[in-house]
Amino acid sequence: MEDERVGLPPGFCFDPTDEELIMYYLKSKVAGLPFYPSINIPHLDFSSSDPSQLNEKALWSKNQWYFFSQVNENRATRKGYWKEGHMNEPIILENFGEKMVGIKKYFGYYNIDEVQTNWIMEEFHLASSNSFKKPSKNENETEWVLCRVHESNNQSQGINWLYRNCDDEVELSALDEVFLSMDDDEEEEISFP
């Protein structure tokens, strides 16, 4: 049987930062622009996919699943529901005057018996959208979000992990590290061999 997972080309690892998810993927989706490189992040309905079924439907990389969805107050699935944590984390572009470009909301997954599981979802919203307003009844006006789902390492982490301190260091992408390592001295000449 052929593998039907939504995947990446061989040798390619999808590991974007929160800022990259907002600036390159969610903004492009909302604007109707293509992604470069061409990456297939599918659109999924919350009610049609339980976390254990994402392997067949969402973009998978580094034990994390990515998909677009439209905001819906009802985040119930066939076998459980996503419960929002009490933490919304602003996504800030520090190199551009501390500009807030998005919001990350955390959710824990509970099974149908209301037992907490170790599944965590991070839901990314554009800051310019009405992230804290209820979605419209008209589907065309519904807000797009980008979701990243992963399984926490242990059950005790669960939803309590959502209340952790957000001052953890952010891991930079290789491109970010290159730009940050460049000297700002404009008088320095670039020489080629």
Image (spheres, rainbow, N blue to C red):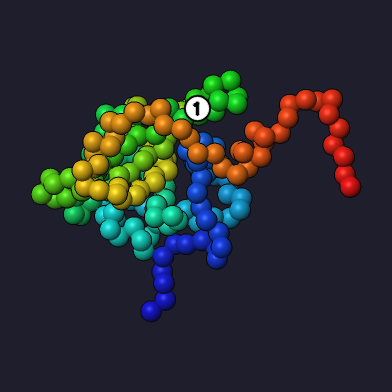
Where 169 falls versus 41 (above or below)? above
Return the residue nearer the eye: 145 or 193: 193
Q: Residue furthest bottom?
A: 1
Residue drawn at x 41%, y 65% is: 5
Regarding residue 30, the answer to whether it shows in the image is: no
Residue drawn at x 46%, y 30% is: 91
All told, the count of numbered labels is 1
Kind of residue at badge 1: Ile
Q: Position of residue 44 (x, y in %)?
A: 37, 52
Return the residue nearer the eye: 96 or 82: 96
Q: Residue furthest top?
A: 97
Q: Determine the image quadrant of residue 10.
A: bottom right
Neighbourhood count class around disc 1 (C-alpha, 10 Å): few under 14, some 14–19, many 20 upward = some
Q: Position of residue 110 (x, y in %)?
A: 19, 46
Residue drawn at x 62%, y 38% is: 177
State the SS at label 1: strand
Q: Which residue is mark 1?
A: 92
Residue drawn at x 55%, y 25% is: 94
Q: Residue furthest left?
A: 113
* Quadrant in which the N terminus appears: bottom left
Q: Position of residue 54 (x, y in %)?
A: 34, 57
Regarding residue 148, the answer to whether it shows in the image is: yes
